[in-house]
Amino acid sequence: MNRPPFLKFLAFLSLASSLTYAPVVSAQGLFAGSKGARTAGRGGAVGAKADDLTAVEYNPAGLTQLGTTTIQVSNRFSYNMETFTRQPSFEDAGGGGQYVVFDKVKNQEPLQALDPLIGVGSNFGLKDFAAALTAYSPPGAARMSFPQGQQSTLSDGGQRYMMVAREAEMLIYALSLAYKYKDLFGVGGTAQWIHVPRLNYSVVVAPILFGMGGNSVRTDLDMVSSVEASDPFTFNAIIGGWLRPMPSLQFGFSAQIVPSEIKAKGTIKVETADVGTPLETTRNGEPADDVQLSIPLPNWLRFAARYLKEHEVDGKKELKYDIEFDLVFHTWSRVKSFELASDNLVARLPAGSLAVGDVDVAKAWRDTLTLQLGGDYAVLPKRLTLRAGASYETAVSYSEYSNVDFPTGQHLSGAVGASVFFGGFELALAYAYRHQLPVKTTIDDGRVYQITPGSRCEPPYSDSTLCPVPGQPAPTVNGGTYTAYNHFLNLDVMYRF
């Protein structure tokens, strides 16, 4: 039934109101894979096609291609595995300590059942205008957890000086507007409210340095430092456009344009690594535990070229098949480090006190390119569409800065998917596999060091009485081999009226 624009507008506002109060169920850390089954099934190549509600993220100008009022509910189920085998190391290398061979460790929370998108878009009965309101979590792995390792099991938790666990919940509320001129070109924009209700990070720290060569395996004073923080609001925006100079050729462009940074405020908890005894933290002699964790977000640019073939079905032009190539550039070089500011917090130890200080988790990430190729084929017009795609991502991190918190090596991905249509409904399903090529670094080359807040070793790290490892602030802890892979199952339910 063709409803008048006023009723479509009411339907839009009704769902928009519910989205405003949508609960946060699960969300992502930094990103992996694609959002939506129709997008994922094409290997992410939708910068020109962008004709469902994932357009608010990939190219908001594509909303003008919806053609009607659309309600979309999506979810992604994922299995996110990462492993690390630390290079064998000496405990107190210069003091005759023991030689330790580490067990392989792996992510202990690989399953993620909720990764949602819900939204509504409409042209309100107008041929050249469209708007959408959506709420979604950016694609990625929300949780990573690894063994901590205790004194009685030195071979466990070889990654513990890099990270014990992290959890990042992120939800984006987005308002998008788009306009097209006939079928020649379209422009659009998305305003994003990024909400981070939870950003937790735990790592084992060694308060002081001692022993020639440093103790890179464990110390009797090891502490677990855990931060729990949140950021209620960060603004960002996406702009996009498409151009169709001929019926069979379409180009797309989109960009996230606002340099933004998550500044999550929260609390820090410090406890002994051996038995978990809590330690009091103070500031100026008074109990305090507030900190701020800062993580820059990248900007990105997307260019897309699409070849498409249409045919007439029931007197209307419908897509028969298409193939699209996208090139995406991310400015990950904005992420020099994850910064923890404690504003002069002090932890009280059994034998004294220790300044928590400001901690930088070194990243030194670099800009990346992602190549995506995918397409659709209408097997049965208005009944069944098949799709497939593949992509390649360059490495985010130099191997010497590899860490277990995020897989940052080169990635290859492949995907297949399908849509089934019945009445005004579309059910889309996609499976994608993402594989990181193995990453290796060594103790000599590694640039992730043990966190030692009580150390007095200062640049250029040449004082042998304060710097047990010449030329660096503390022992290297990221030498080893990293592997990672993801299985994604995406499901979309769409209703158009």
Image (cartoon, rainbow, N blue to C red):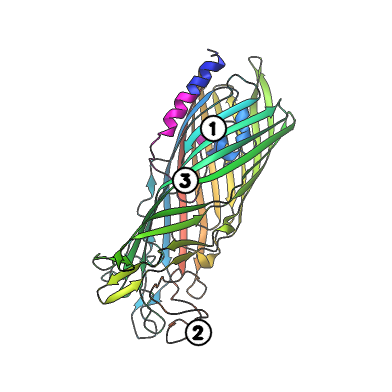
- Residue bearing the label numbered 3: 233
What are the residue bounds of the magenta stretch? 13-38
User: Residue 114 appears in which quarter of the rendering?
Assistant: top left
Q: Where residue 459 appears, x then y in whole percent?
A: 51, 79
Residue furthest top in the image: 1
Q: Earlier in the sequence, mark 2 or mark 3?
A: 3
Q: Earlier in the sequence, mark 1 or mark 2?
A: 1
**Amino acid residing under circle 2:** Ser
Label 3 secondary element = strand
Tell me, for residue 462, which label it has, or none.
Answer: 2
**Magenta residues, dominant SS class:** loop
User: Vertical placement of 495 versus 466: above or below?
Assistant: above
Label 2 secondary element = loop
- Left or right: residue 158 compared with residue 239: left
Label 1 secondary element = loop
- Residue bearing the label numbered 1: 53
**Amino acid residing under circle 1:** Leu
Q: Residue at x 35, y 65 (%)?
A: 157
